[in-house]
Image (tube, rainbow, N blue to C red):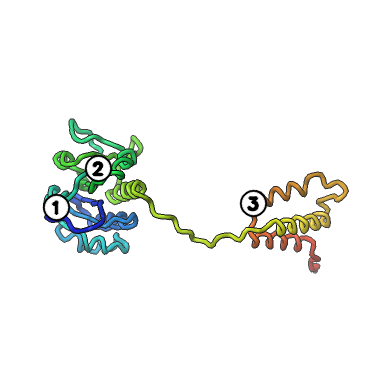
Amino acid sequence: MTAPATADRTRFVLVGTSHAGNVGAAARAMKVMGFSDLVLVAPRFPDVLARPDAAAFASGATDVLAAARVVPTLAEALDGITWACATAMTPRDFGPPTFAPREHFASLAASDHRVAFVFGAERTGMSNDDVYRCHACLSIPTHPGYGSLNLAQAVQLLAYDWRQALGSFAVEARTAPRDLADGAAVEGLVAHWEQMLVEIGFLDPQAPKKLLPRLRQLFNRAQLGTEEVHILRGIARAAVSPRPRRE
């Protein structure tokens, strides 16, 4: 098998997968982290990529499914790969060294390797022979008493850590930048509150003590926006406004 021409140096390999939904969810996990090279090795159902559950769980990552390949052996899936990482928890008498993902990715990201992450079947995991074909074994740190991860969850965790090691995507702002109130606006607010506090009897102007400096410090720490200054001045205005009498 000839590996496809791609700038993506990362491949995700699923061996013996049983559930189409897991394949779709794995494709989704890959795409949100910017990866697209997916290879299935001898899946339980040859038409797994075309099953409705695969597209449903991909949730928009159907392009990854459409480009995915199915091959009969792991050796073919690793064609063009120079560093393969097994994902297996079962202790073995010998085999590749085991690392936590972040520990291993720090140095791997700085290399020129074309990397594959290999995942075993949902029920049985990876066979010894498949693990022995890999250069390293990754073990996701989980609670000692319960380390069972869904296949797609494991793909997502490794895809995330690998993306962080390669260089994460920028976080886009979801809200507009705040229009911070300037010093004059804050002083106007303090003066307005001083007037209100005197009128409601909370502040004695003959013995103000440190109330106003403390309010000023409070407003400064809050880094008020202009809209927030308007709200606080509106509260001060309402506190001293005549209220209609209730019959």
Q: Which mark is residue 206?
A: none
> For mark 3, does the 10 Å Cα neighbourhood hold few (<14), some (14 to 19), or many (20 or more) residues?
few
Above-or-below relation of 85 to 173: above
Question: Which residue position is annotated with label 1?
Answer: 42
Name the one closer to the observer, 116 or 91.
Answer: 116
Q: CA distance from mark 1 to mark 2?
A: 17 Å
> For mark 2, does the 10 Å Cα neighbourhood hold few (<14), some (14 to 19), or many (20 or more) residues?
many
| Closer mark to the observer between disc 3 and disc 1 | 3
Q: Residue drawn 21% across and 50% down?
A: 13
Question: Which residue position is annotated with label 2?
Answer: 87
Q: Can you name the residue that lies furthest to the right here?
A: 206
What amino acid type should be assigned to the residue bearing mark 2? Thr
Question: Which residue position is annotated with label 3?
Answer: 222
Mark 1 lies on a secondary structure that is loop
Q: CA distance from mark 3 to mark 1?
A: 59 Å
Mark 2 lies on a secondary structure that is strand
Name the one closer to the observer, 6 or 57.
Answer: 6
Of the numbered discs 1 and 2, the one sitting upstream in the chain is: 1
Q: Residue drawn 28% across and 54% down?
A: 26
Q: Quadrant of residue 123?
A: top left
Horizontal relation, residue 219 to residue 7: left or right: right
What amino acid type should be assigned to the residue bearing mark 3? Ala
| Closer mark to the observer between disc 2 and disc 3 | 3
Q: Residue drawn 20% across and 52% down?
A: 17
Q: CA distance from mark 2 to mark 3?
A: 48 Å
Which of the image's four quarters has the C terminus?
A: bottom right
Q: Give coordinates of residue 160: x percent, y percent.
A: 34, 49
Q: Residue drawn 88% across and 48% down?
A: 206
Mark 3 lies on a secondary structure that is helix
